[in-house]
Image: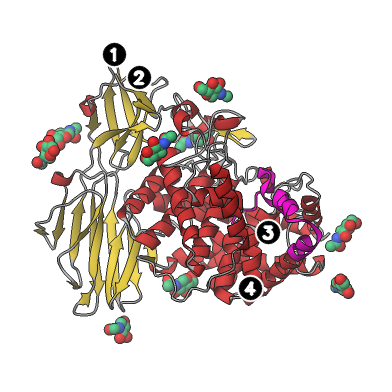
Amino acid sequence: MKLLGVVVFIIVHLVNSVPIPCETPISNKLTPFFLQQVHLVDSVHSPSLAGQQLNQAYLDILPVDRLLYTYYRNANLSVEGIEPLGGWESPESDIRGVFLAFYLQASVKAYLAYNNTRQLAKAQQLVEQLSRVQKILNDSGFLAAWPSENLRKLERLEKVWAPIYCYEKLLRGLSDMYTFTGMTLAGSMMHDMLDYLYTWMVHCANTYPASHWHTMIFSTTDYEYGGISEFLYEQYGLTRDERFFWMAQQFDDGQFLGALSLNADFLQGIHANSHVPPVLGSGRRYSITGEQQYRAILENFFSLVWNNHTYSTGGSNGGNGSVGFYQQEHYSDPNRLSQTLWNNNQEFCVQYNMLKVIRVLIEWTGQVEFMNAYERVFVNSIWGTQDPSGPGHMLYSYPLGEGVSKPTAVSSGGIGYGSQFDSFWCCYTTAIDQWTKMSDSIYFFQVENEASSLYVNLFVASQLDWQAHDNLSIRQTTTFPRETTTVLTVATILDAVPFRIYLRVPSWIVANESWIEINGVRQQMTLTPSTYALLASTSWKNNDRIVYNMAMQLHVEPINDNPQLVSILFGPIVLGGLINKAKTLSRDVTSIRQVNTTAYEPLQFEATALDGSTFRLLPLYEIVNQTYTVYFPLE
Ligand SMILES: *[C@@H]1O[C@H](CO)[C@@H](O)[C@H](O)[C@H]1NC(C)=O
Ligand SMILES: *[C@@H]1O[C@H](CO)[C@@H](O)[C@H](O)[C@H]1NC(C)=O
Ligand SMILES: *[C@@H]1O[C@H](CO)[C@@H](O)[C@H](O)[C@H]1NC(C)=O
Ligand SMILES: *[C@@H]1O[C@H](CO)[C@@H](O)[C@H](O)[C@H]1NC(C)=O
Ligand SMILES: *[C@@H]1O[C@H](CO)[C@@H](O)[C@H](O)[C@H]1NC(C)=O
Ligand SMILES: *[C@@H]1O[C@H](CO)[C@@H](O)[C@H](O)[C@H]1NC(C)=O
Ligand SMILES: *[C@@H]1O[C@H](CO)[C@@H](O)[C@H](O)[C@H]1NC(C)=O
Ligand SMILES: *[C@@H]1O[C@H](CO)[C@@H](O)[C@H](O)[C@H]1NC(C)=O
Ligand SMILES: *[C@@H]1O[C@H](CO)[C@@H](O)[C@H](O)[C@H]1NC(C)=O
């Protein structure tokens, strides 16, 4: 009861609080580079680049007309000869048109990250057609692939799937086109859409009691409202237009956010993906107003999910049934996590959103633990989710059980990898966005007292063009994790460029077998796990070369609720045993040995179980179709 009282207080406080002008803007510890500044480069082994290319092939095979089908139909334009898309994009789906919204976002990133001007032209064409639809609808700025009547249904609490979520995604797509490519048409379309939304929200505020709004927006998963608060707080930050602040606040769920601000773990049984974006909204609010409780919401959310609801892959949601703590797509009971392992665990879209949460924490704090977390999710829960045999075959949920496989993963309305034209799940929308920004968060920087520092977070073959330092670029060459070294080479036409380099020393490193060389000279420095290694030189010349060896070892990590049930990792990489049944292993991981490999083939291991039988293990991300098991009992 006491907790309830506090929660009610917080709800009232959250809903009634007014924007506190932020005197000095929140200063972040670290800043990510723009997508234009970092490019993935060729490598013998780069799951990031391979995934980016496969995803681009998918973007390429999706025709403009088919993407627009439901928008055309909504405006009564002829769709003769155009084949509608299937799955969640089918003309009968309430959330039709949302994939196109993500397609715009992904196109902008493809343009920024790897200069795909063809992709940008395609997105411009889509926006022009959308503008035509918006004009024909002639509905006070409203734009969607479904009628504005769906918002009336929401008002009447009738069954309708996520109209606000869809609306926000299109706002975001248009906003990206406007902000990052300068397409003014997209900007004015977005403003018209926002005017419509504002008018509708004022109408609701004048017509219904607050409790009705609460039910409309927060009561069911069907009414999922996505990242609308984040978007609106961002608009407020850009324009200082109080309308946007008021609108954003209406989407702050006091009960959910209030409990998080108290660090109460009531996540179990909560639908994961509809609750991560509102947390990002709180983070945005804090970054604009400086209100500490909104920072605490995001910080607490991360630590609750990470410490109590997360598998060894860094992924977090998905139970094995249809109710309660076992419910699919929901957070489970931290005390029963081991009972949720099967062929339908963590959803891609949730891990995509968690990376956004972790990235915010890296920016705010610069703490290495968040970079470690980012890597864990990135290499285990992003890599390995596309079937490499062709574009457009991606996973909805990731199987983590015993004797599971990706082709038998349970997906929405099907089994296994999705298909090119008939899936379009939330894990497709977020996937096309994720795979166009694989160069993001590899590097961060910091400028303090005019001194700049470069932070190397991820070990991915890439090139950084550092604009603040004219004519400086840094190339990272690596086949990580197949090989444990990465090489950084400086290129500049200047005599010397002053800046510091901090290399992340991952938590998993074998310290006494790891080392750093600068221009062939072994550095006398102790590498402590979960710190940053500051390199001795503060001035860098052309062709300066840093070789960083991060020795990996096999280790086991127990699941949250059972110290006897472990996942096997090599460095940050979760391994899957190619076996139908979980064999009992000895506590001593020397019963597992690395089989010789080169950068041209996947890492491979051989385990000897207690019963004397042997089996192979591969990195989970390298497994495509084989049957595998992730967790093993210890003797
Ligand atoms: C981007 O692509 C366009 C056209 O393909 C080309 O003209 C331009 O030089 C490229 N820009 C960069 C920075 O590579
Ligand atoms: C499209 O046609 C339907 C049915 O005739 C009508 O109700 C609707 O108003 C029309 N919409 C537009 C934008 O013309
Ligand atoms: C758009 O709607 C307004 C009234 O809402 C009407 O006056 C106007 O003629 C309409 N425009 C078109 C092109 O149909
Ligand atoms: C949640 O995580 C914290 C921090 O690791 C731990 O102390 C606590 O026991 C965990 N609770 C449950 C139920 O797992
Ligand atoms: C999920 O796991 C629990 C605990 O092992 C079990 O009781 C339940 O039957 C499982 N549900 C499904 C659908 O497999
Ligand atoms: C995986 O299996 C699917 C069918 O289940 C098949 O289409 C695909 O080619 C396979 N991929 C690989 C890389 O073997
Ligand atoms: C960077 O290089 C360009 C030509 O490549 C040159 O014009 C410019 O002055 C250089 N910048 C600095 C700071 O040296
Ligand atoms: C590193 O330390 C471990 C134990 O802490 C030891 O077993 C191993 O031999 C050491 N390796 C080297 C190269 O010294
Ligand atoms: C495997 O590695 C060991 C130790 O590095 C080496 O002596 C041996 O020749 C390698 N075997 C093969 C088949 O590559």
* Callout 2 secondary element: loop
Q: Residue 324 shows which numbered tag?
A: none
Name the residue that disc number 2 marks: 583
- Upstream in the sequence, badge 1 or badge 2? 2
Q: Give the range drawn in magenta.
A: 200-228
Q: How dense is the environment of label 4, judged by Cα within 10 Å: few (below 14), some, or many (20 and up)?
A: some
Question: Can you tell which quarter of the image residue 34 is in?
Answer: bottom left
* Residue 608, percent from left and from top: 26, 21
Amino acid at dot 4: Glu
Q: Distance between the residues labelled 3 and 2?
A: 49 Å
- Furthest residue toward top: 611
* Residue 77, percent from left and from top: 81, 61
Position of residue 272 in the picture relative to residue 615 (left or right): right
Name the residue that disc number 1 marks: 611
Question: In what quadrant of the picture does the C terminus appear?
Answer: top left
The main secondary structure of the magenta stretch is: helix
Name the residue that disc number 3 marks: 167
- Upstream in the sequence, badge 4 or badge 2? 4
* Residue 104, percent from left and from top: 59, 62
Q: How far apart are marks 1 and 2 (CA)?
A: 8 Å
Q: How dense is the environment of label 2, judged by Cα within 10 Å: few (below 14), some, or many (20 and up)?
A: many
Q: How far apart are marks 4 and 1 (CA)?
A: 68 Å
At horizontal 81% and vertical 66% (from top left) the residue drawn is 139
Q: Are marks 1 and 3 in contact (CB under 8 Å)?
A: no
Task: Note whether 404 is above or below 294 in the view shown.
Answer: above
Residue 553 shown in magenta: no
